[in-house]
Amino acid sequence: MTRRRAALLLAAVSVAFAAAGGATWAAFTSTTANSSSISAAADFTAPTVTRSTTSKSTGYSPDYIKQGGSYYVYAQVTDSGNPASGVSTVTADASQITVGSTAVPLVAGSYSVGGQTYNYRTALQTAAASIPNGTKTFSITATDAASNSSTSSGLVVNIDNILPTIIGGDVQAANVTGGTASRMEANDTLTLKFGEQMDPDSILSTWTGASLSVTVRVINNASNDQIQIWNSANTTQAALGTVSTNGNFVSGNVNFTGSTMVQSAGTLTITLGTPSVPANLRTVGANTTMTWAPSTSAYDRAGNAFSTAFGSSLTETGTADIDF
Ligand SMILES: [Ca+2]
Ligand SMILES: [Ca+2]
Ligand SMILES: [Ca+2]
Ligand SMILES: [Ca+2]
């Protein structure tokens, strides 16, 4: 093909597309004289919603909200094309959560929730006053500057209106393999179980549930020594209330520094670190039955705070046994 023929063909194609009226041409990338084809480049590709979540406005855990609660819809949106024309608008249909909210705009920015980053988020929304427990769906529509549009639908948010209580909870302790039973020591474990998964950020600010260094305080209290969990620096108490050992485990206060705490579903496992005053540790040598009074500051993934409606303290379950 001659250079002139190529130019004519290019012009003809341009006219044809302009007449069709549907396409926005971003650029022509190559028109080689020796080729019988013309490769044109434009953005015919709608943006992609890589991930999204609808989450309460506080804490760490994503994907959960409660009726009447405030929430955001987040999305990570990228546009492609050759070249991409760029994301123009992103909207959410959250009408199953908030009546009438069929096209809530998401604003570009840098957001983070549940350990993920997002580049679009709605303004703060308020869920309907009454939504049954279970799941609801939402969708996200993203449109690029060339008017290509895509919708991700059937996205799920969990509705949880049930307050965590002592029901389903437990407190247990275990002796480290090869350790001295009935004596607190490094690598013994304390297990605190809630009836449902809690938001770790409500227990210690910025905690994600991954293994975290903490200080375990054992407060001498005659024959009912008390246990509290504090942050690594031993300056902020975790919202885990107090465990009463009903045993004489220490003759004076002991801090287990470099202890660790990790979350798995509703269960927190605390592994004791190094005792600050080993001489204060005692071997109880008898069965003990612990009780645990959780904190009402802790809340679940939907933001429901721990409630004392069924009692403020729960008792170690199972057959009477030696602890630690
Ligand atoms: Ca709940
Ligand atoms: Ca032990
Ligand atoms: Ca004591
Ligand atoms: Ca026991």
Image (spheres, helix red, strand yellow):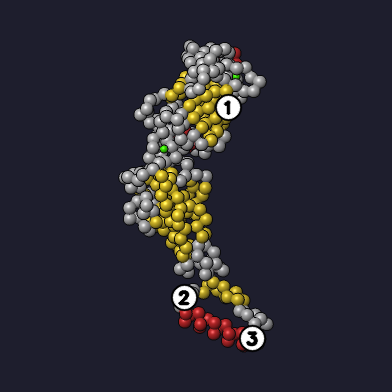
- Residue to which mark 2 is pinned: 22
Mark number for residue 3? 3
Where residue 127 sits in the image (x, y, percent)? Answer: 35, 47
For badge 1, the amino acid type reads Thr
Decide which of tag 3 and tag 1 comes sooner along the chain: 3
Closer to the camera: disc 3 or disc 1?
A: 1
Front one among 129 and 204: 129
- Residue to which mark 1 is pinned: 271
Mark number for residue 235? none
For badge 2, the amino acid type reads Gly
Decide which of tag 2 and tag 1 comes sooner along the chain: 2
Q: Is residue 231 above or below residue 22?
A: above
Task: Check the picture and name the quadrant holding the N terminus.
Answer: bottom right
Ligand 2 lies in quarter = top right
Query: Residue at coordinates 48% horizontally, 22% vertically from top-left?
Result: 316
Query: Residue at coordinates 45% horizontally, 50% vertically from top-left?
Result: 156
Is there any visible trace of residue 216 in the rendered image?
A: no
Marks 3/1: CA distance?
77 Å
